Amino acid sequence: MGRLIVIANRLPFSITKREGEFYFRSSAGGLAVGLSSLPESYERLWIGWPGITNEKLTNHDKKQIKEKLAEENCLPVFLSEKQIEQYYLGFSNKTIWPLFHYFPTRTVWEDRFWKTYQQVNQTFLKTVTDIIEPGDCVWVHDYQLMLLPQMLRENFPDLEIGFFLHIPWPSFELFRLLPWREEILNGILGADLIGFHTYDYVRHFLSSVCRIMGLEHTLGQVRIGNRIIKIDAFPMGIDYEKYSQAIENPGTKNEVDKILQTVGKRKIIISIDRLDYTKGIIQRLEAFDLFLSENPEYKGKVTLIMVAVPSRTDVEDYQALRNRLEQLVGRINGEHGAIGYIPVWYLYRFMPFNKIAALYNVADVALVTPLRDGMNLIAKEFIASKTDGKGILILSEMTGAASELGEALIVNSNNKGAIVQAIKNALEMPLSEQIERNRLMQERIARYDVSRWSSDFIHALSDIKKKQRELYVRKLSGAERQKLIADYGKSEKRLLLLDYDGTLVGFKGKPAQAGPDDEIINLLESLSSNDKNCIVIISGRDKKTLDEWLGNLKVSLVAEHGAWIKQINKQWQCTQPHPTRWKDNIRPILELYSDRTPGSSVEEKDFALVWHYRRADAELANIRGQELRDALLNMTENLDVGVFEGNKIIEIKSVGVNKGLAVEFWATNQEWDFLLAAGDDYTDEEMFRALPDGAYSIKVGLSVSNARFQVDTLNEIRLLLKELARN
């Protein structure tokens, strides 16, 4: 097994330089804990910025830092002050952070930020390129490095790449505001596995991919070229034992005693957050102010301990937020306080683990009400710490954690009245109910802890890569290709069955052109001029269209997926009679859905009806398509017709109509010593199934198929046919 290379904006160590000496401080968070819990069989290497800029370092300093970090299986990426200013504080935290957290009015659109963001992602790429080895697995983390997966893919096509976003993915309506939206999506789609905290974020991402990139998904899988990409939810957990056992630590017990001696018998509400406008700290404090105003009997009986951890202290918005917060704390304490009673204990500082664990343990209520949060591990840490079961979590529905912690008191963080009521309910809730609520949540987060999160992601990445390789094995390799050409060259009677749309013309995901181009006409003329060849063009199109486009060529034609057959110099003949009375009942339904879905249309064939939605809005078409399919399945249950989904179409046709009938017609007509069939979608599967053993069957596109071989694009089919024509 190769190494697991973790790439994140920051290393799990912060480095400072004082008086010529370097000081290394561990800053291990949930990610570091999750990775450390992986089996020893995973050799790990962490790549990231060490927290100190180039301007403060000499070449000797960099060498010294590298050597020290190498002992911890870490590799630094050195960045300049300008890069940190524009890539991290700029694009990452003034563009992506507010937009993805639903604060578009705070979002800054600066082209120079974007260019530096690209540049820094390239710098990370160079660092990886210098050390990558065969068999390595790369796991890229978070919004600072969203371009890196595709950069890695372009340089290492077979590399196993995972990407995890630790913040929310916004709805399409917000994401579309980003001028560089296609570049960001393309960057992330370089990964094999893309992970988010919740299925809501997965849904939003897939919607963006569909509506911006034109790529649809099947059960969370998106296909790009020869790769299948999996998008799934992996809710990040915590080190459950660390928090559940913290009270046994003497340091934590000492901190608990200090708090209780000071607070006495008052109820304790805690609020612990990094100082950020997305955390809803102001709204939370205003709600507590309203609670004391509406419930004066609690004055002197309840204290809010508010910890605001300094964050981005040199950013003007954060300085303004701190000033507003401190003014509000002062007003509340002045209005509701008394001698010996301070309603709000405000602490603006980083707090070590023992102090945080002590606060979790003594708290009667944890107030966790961000306006938007990717996950929020504080909520889980609080629940894990309540070993006695006492204490209630009030949690914003805007957090990722809300989908897992449903037994908490869930509130809308913008509804101050709801928060006030939740505080009152929490303070007055019977102990038995508190214990039962917490027990259920504890069992859940204990099962899916941070160790399970990291191992699940790595296993899922391995699984999707394995699936890719299984499909790749079926690709028409150089050796098989040469064997096919050799067999063609030595044969005397050859049958070539060629699908039209998606195989000879057009390409996946885009409409075919109006008719065959000069190249394909010349190619078919060349192949059909050889008396050893019998060329059959099989299409879903109608007879008239095929006659117009290909009727002058020395080829046989199949229309409407096998309903009609035309041999060279003969008239069209129906393969077998098919009743069409069902069309009168189905046609109005298709027309209704066409009217309700702008950009869609209905096509009528002799033995089929087709609803096309290529030009419709992708998301609306997806919804309408599901509704239509369900309605049609119910209506056709007792009819001799089938409902089939193709590339941006839903087709209703007589069950007996399929390309397999056409294959049988020609394959059994005489003995062939070479047989080749090529197709690209579900309608060609019957053709592949009907082929005799030993025939060469080729599917355009990598997906599950009855074909023996697969190729990425129709261009490969054209190149193959050109080689055959030269023989």
Image (cartoon, rainbow, N blue to C red):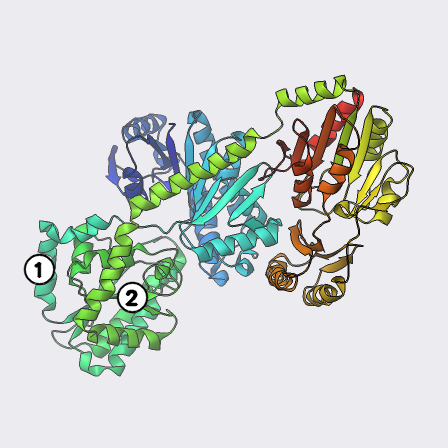
Q: Tag on residue 408?
A: 2
Q: Does residue 78 appear left or right of residue 69 in this picture?
A: right
Q: Position of residue 190 (x, y in %)?
A: 52, 39
Secondary element under disc 1, as helix, strand or loop, is helix
Name the spot of residue 607 as percent of width and height, x first.
77, 54
Which amino acid type is marked by label 1? Asp
Q: Which residue is mark 1?
A: 257
User: What is the quadrant of residue 709 in the picture?
Assistant: top right
Residue displayed at 71% across by 60% down: 599
- Occupied quadrant, residue 84: top left
Residue 534, image x, y percentages: 82, 30
Mark positioned earlier in the residue sequence (1 or 2): 1
**Residue at 21% over, 53% down:** 351
Quadrant position of residue 228? top right
Depicted 562 relative to depicted 168: above or below: above
Between 45 and 579, the one lying in front of the other is 579
**Observer-nearest residue: 20 or 721?**
721
- Locate residue 627 relative to residue 20 in the image: left or right: right
